[in-house]
Image (spheres, rainbow, N blue to C red):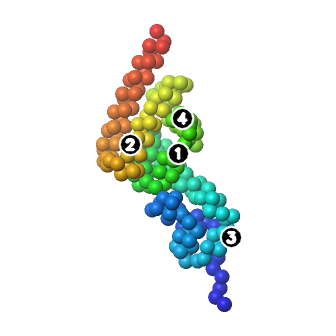
Amino acid sequence: MPPVTRISKEAIIQTAYEIVRKKGMEGINARAIAKKLNCSIQPIFHKFNNMEELKEELIVKIKETYQNYLKESWKEEHPYKAMGMNYIRFAKEEPKLFQIILMGKNKISAEEFVVHDENYEDIKTKVSQATGFSGEQLREFHLKIWIFTHGLATMLATQTCQFTEEQISSMLTDIFNALYREEKSKGELNHE
């Protein structure tokens, strides 16, 4: 009798992750994972109760990848702009992962979507450092920036349009400056 091959939970998740990076969530099933691992489906269901449980852990891994893209921004000279650039880079380099965690169907508002980002507290700090805004003004400014940035990222993730890094950088600078001037003038009007 041949020796039993032990397949770890981590190996199963990593294999599922590699599949989803290429084929999206619809490419994930026990047979596809087992084939790539060169085993039966039995080890998969030994480590996970069902495919939904595996997919939940896979989502955690995908979110970690996203977090790593954003965390690179905090080291940059202009971290708020770098965050936008890295958000878009994530969409371009990992379109299937971006689509899974950032383009799914939600019944929440754009504001709720932004506020529920795990990085929101760090983001608020970076927005404040970049603009001097706080409170409602900060929230409004970031929401508009995020909507624009998400639109660019979505176009790249779905291959609707292609942009160079220079074009993306220029557009983010332009929208930042335009919205900054708008919010600044609104703030000045409110203080008169």
- Residue under label 1, please give it: 105
Q: Which residue shows up at 39% across the image and 32% down it?
A: 176
Of mark 4 and mark 3, the one earlier in the sequence is 3
Q: Which amino acid, mark 4?
A: Ser
Q: Is residue 74 visible?
A: yes
Left or right side of 122 for 48? right
The answer to whether mark 2 and mark 3 are in CB contact below 8 A is no
Alpha carbon distance from label 2 to label 4 = 19 Å
Of mark 1 and mark 3, the one earlier in the sequence is 3
Q: Which residue shows up at 68% across the image and 70% down it?
A: 46
Of mark 2 and mark 4, the one earlier in the sequence is 4
- Residue under label 4, please give it: 109
The answer to whether mark 1 and mark 3 are in CB contact below 8 A is no
Of residue 87 and residue 16, the one placed in the foreground of this image is 16
Left or right side of 177 for 104? right
* Badge 1: residue crowd in 10 Å (few <14, some 14–19, many ≥20): few
Which element type, helix, strand or loop, lies under badge 4?
Answer: loop
Viewer-side label of 1, 3: 1
- Residue under label 2, please give it: 152
Q: Which amino acid, mark 3?
A: His
Q: Which residue shows up at 46% across the image and 9% down it?
A: 192
Which element type, helix, strand or loop, lies under badge 2?
Answer: helix
